[in-house]
Amino acid sequence: MTLNLGVLISGRGSNLEAILKAVADRRLDGRVALVVSNRAAAAGLEIAARHGVPTQVLPHQGFPSRAAYDAALVDALRAREVDTVALAGFDRIVSGTLLAAFPGRVVNIHPALLPSFPGLHAQRQALEHGVRVSGATVHLVDEQVDHGPIIAQAIVPVLDTDTEETLSERILAEEHRIYPEALQRLASGRLQVVGRRVIGGLP
Ligand code: GRF
């Protein structure tokens, strides 16, 4: 199945760019139909425009609730016939309204080895905890933050000399590799969720 992706961003957009490159290189069977940002200043909007992808800025301020904002998101995504939603540095918690509209088809990337270090500043949390390895996780989104079934993970070492910045860079390189790979597994149509385990769809 060819994915018709909606990518939600708030900032830099380097994961969006990795996804767009994978589409261009035919490593990912799909297309990005729409990029939505809740912030007008997100640099990722320019990346989308450069790739000829439609963009929409949907500021979250002014919506009475998370569900109301998510209903507007769903409308925007449906208008472009999106079937799969990739969160890529989207700094809002999504509600059941979005998840119900795209059941089992909302994916997120997190810069730590979940279930360790969910939430903000995952790389700083890892450094402060003193772990010797960290990494990145791509997972299906459920109603808890950074919690749903895990599709893919990658490991990086934590070095004695690391700062939050150097560790983040090392993790980011892995994010760019595993996010398109995980989406391609979804595209294969062979992924199954059994309990909390995601199986199948590997090449
Ligand atoms: C990434 O580290 C991602 O794991 C986290 O937010 C960051 C987004 O970076 N959820 P970018 O906007 O994709 O460059």
Image (spheres, rainbow, N blue to C red):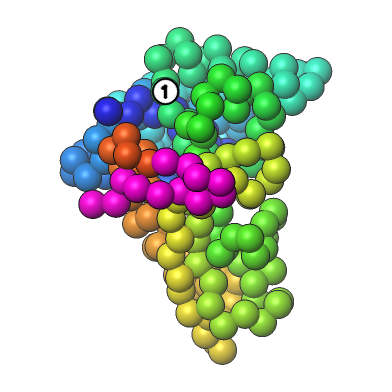
Give how far across and how far down residue 56 sits, in percent.
50, 21
| Left or right of residue 182: residue 86 | right
In this rendering, is residue 164 above or below 41? below
| Left or right of residue 169: residue 101 | right
In this rendering, is residue 148 above or below 163? above
Identity, as a three-letter code, of the amino acid under mark 1: Asp
Farthest-out residue, left: 25
Give how far across and how far down residue 11 sits, in percent.
55, 42
Q: Is residue 193 magenta?
A: yes
- For the magenta stretch, what is the residue range? 192-203
| Left or right of residue 129: residue 83 | left
Check disc 1 and report its element: helix, strand or loop. Answer: loop
Q: Is residue 157 magenta?
A: no
In this figure, which residue is indicated by the disc labeled 1?
Answer: 83
Farthest-out residue, front: 194
The picture quadrant where one finds residue 24 is: top left
Give me the residue at 47% from left, 36% from top.
Answer: 86
In this rendering, is residue 175 above or below 33? below
Residue 143 visible within the image: yes
Q: Is the CB of the residue bearing disc 1 within 8 angstroms of ligand 1?
A: no
Residue 124 visible within the image: no
User: If the image is split into quadrants, where does the N terminus sit?
Assistant: top left
Give how far across and how far down residue 70 sits, in percent.
65, 22
Q: Residues within 10 Å of mark 1 (few under 14, many from 20)?
A: some
* Viewer-closest of 104 and 71: 104
Give me the residue at 66% from left, 22% from top.
Answer: 97
